[in-house]
Amino acid sequence: MRRLAAVLLAALMLVGNLQLPAGAASEPSAIQSVSEPPQPADDTALLPAPATAVPWWERTSRDSDRNGIVDWLEEQTEPMAVGVSYSYQPGQRELELLLLADFEPRLLLSDAVLLGNVTPEHFALAASLPGVVMVEPYGKVEFYGDVQTPAIRAKNSTVYPTGAWDLGYTGKGINIAIVDTGIDNEHPGVAGKFVAGYDAVCYMHTDIPRCLLSGTGSREDDGSFDPDDGNQHGTACSGMATATGMLADGTLTDYQGAAPDAYLVDVKIGSDVGAGPFENYLTEQEAYESAMNGLQWVIDHRDDAWPGVDEANSGIDIVSLSWGITSHEDGGSDGTDMHSRRLDEVTDAGVVVSVAAGNSGPDNDGFSGMGASSLSVTVGALDDHNTIERDDDTIASYSSRGPRRDNNDGYPYNELKPDVSAPGSNIVQAEGCYTSGTCHNIFDDASQNGYSGRGSGTSYATPSVAGVMALLLEVNPDLTPALIKEILRTTAEPRGEPTYPELDPFWNRDFGWGLVDALIAVEEAELLEDPENVDVELQAYILETQTNDSIIISGVSWARLGNVSAVQYRLDDGPWREVPEYSVELPQPTGAYIPWSISLSAAELAFSGEHTLFVRAMGTNGTHSLTPHTNFQADGFTSESNGSNLLPIIMAIALVLGGAIAVVAYRSGRLTPPRD
């Protein structure tokens, strides 16, 4: 109590620009700090809003007794690496108070401070410090790993003759940050793509002495340092996102990433054998700190102009994370942990994130930090059985299943994880120096390496989705992270029965909203005329296009928040008109499904041939949903629709619509994990 009283008294006295207490002056100089809190990008409008304004620390399921200490920590008897989270951005004053309380601050984040090992008897002291809202454990960093790119319909094939690349989009001008074990940028498949890099492994204060002893020194933080990959994981992931397929002799192979013209930002957070303890890491906590350091660097430098690089290639557009951080807690994370909040912060800053769901399989105990992030795109892995055909794709046995643990914000949709799935099994990799066994980055490089060593994991599905994100941003640089996420989800090919049909008619705990479809996603982005008016909480799906004596397009709409005021359609370049026939009266309660249909006789069509019909759900304030479309023939009556993959789900929706639709589940705001 005397120690606590002294700290609280000091808190009252600490004002203005304070000096460090005697004997502690050397400590804060080694602490990485945030220069300014990140501001949301001007174009990040209409991110999904929580249904309640209660702050996360007052509703998180990770602190059931609301004492400001994560429940799992209170069961520990040995020292644990922890961080303290604040209700505001901590700074010099908070560092002073931590030092006065005999804690050793190690890394300053935008809303937290990492402390390293703390004994259990001092958890309560940390929780009692002014501004602290939660004491949280670090967790453990874990890395998760020919037909992949054509299977997602980015590249064309004999099976799918048209791919997204055929529309002219290959990721040109887009920067993808691969936050991983580094990249061997000399590899012929990724040569010429490097625009910036940062080594969070040796830059951490505890690593600098060991780095100096090994002759490597501390790393520059302006993006000019080019980290190498001694592990292979990072180089493999960079190839799945951006590889050109080139070999050293100029031969072009089929081992291409989803966005072969995108550029790379190399953020190294892991070392030669993956994640600690290893190489420059003595403990797991140092691996964790380097991971958090790397993410904070992304946040702080997301808009930077890179040294020696054309201004058009400045900044970071996309982050790809093929790893997770175990939460140690029963039930996994609810998205309020320090790691998931970092990713939400990246997204709020205007950078879209593709993150691995994890490799814990169908009996996983929730999602880890990172994969539990509310705003990121969480990616599950498919087993494509080494075929381009999508029909035989199944969920990979190792892919973590949903839903996420409930964060008690009254908005059940952010518990629906994973978001989408992509091929992740037996993927051929760009070969780093470590894998080849014939080169080492100290004396040689990967410039003569090729592609080999099939690997599996949600690690390898994640960068493929990051590549598709690059295609979407090339189509329309004004797309916000929320819009990119919504386009990927609504254009995915649904698989499996809906897990919570009363809440969403498509989401499945194995596949998410389905298999990523780069071609349909790019088409949707191309046809989106006014992204600034899109509200991602408004939903509109085309379920079926019938072409007999007349043309009938049917579908369903609803609002996850707010209400649908009308459903509109547009034929070709004509005006928007309201759908003439609803199966229910408007308005409907939030979350209630609104079936609708549009009947077009041949006489109403201005010409014979192919037509396109667009649909959108309208909000009450002039906003609208994304605008799915269907293509059909007025003569011959054949149809092709971006809703054509939804036909197997129509019967399931019909069953749902026969009951008291969605309202009860929505009101409760909770999801109960299904039993297999």
Image (spheres, rainbow, N blue to C red):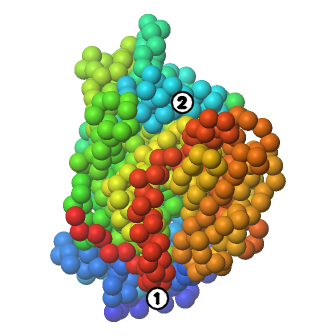
Circle 1 is placed at which residue position? Answer: 8
Q: In which quarter of the image is residue 513?
A: bottom left
Point out the tag, 1 or 2, that comes first from the N-terminus.
Answer: 1
**Callout 2 crowding tier (Cα within 10 Å): few <14, some 14–19, many ≥20:** many
* Amino acid at pointer 2: Gly
Residue under the image location 48 percent in, 90 percent down:
9
Q: Quadrant of residue 526?
A: top right
Closer to us: 457 or 490: 490
Q: Up-down: is 402 above or below 356?
A: below
Residue under the image location 30 percent in, 65 percent down:
366
Query: Is the C-beta separation of discs 1 and 2 under 8 Å?
Result: no
Relative side of 12 to 22, left or right: right
**Callout 1 crowding tier (Cα within 10 Å): few <14, some 14–19, many ≥20:** some
Q: Up-down: is 10 above or below 392?
A: below
Regarding residue 320, the answer to whether it shows in the image is no
Question: Is label 2 in a helix, a strand or a loop?
Answer: loop
Q: Up-down: is 64 above or below 574?
A: below
Question: Is label 1 in a helix, a strand or a loop?
Answer: helix
Q: Up-down: is 153 above or below 19?
A: above
Relative side of 99 to 427, left or right: right
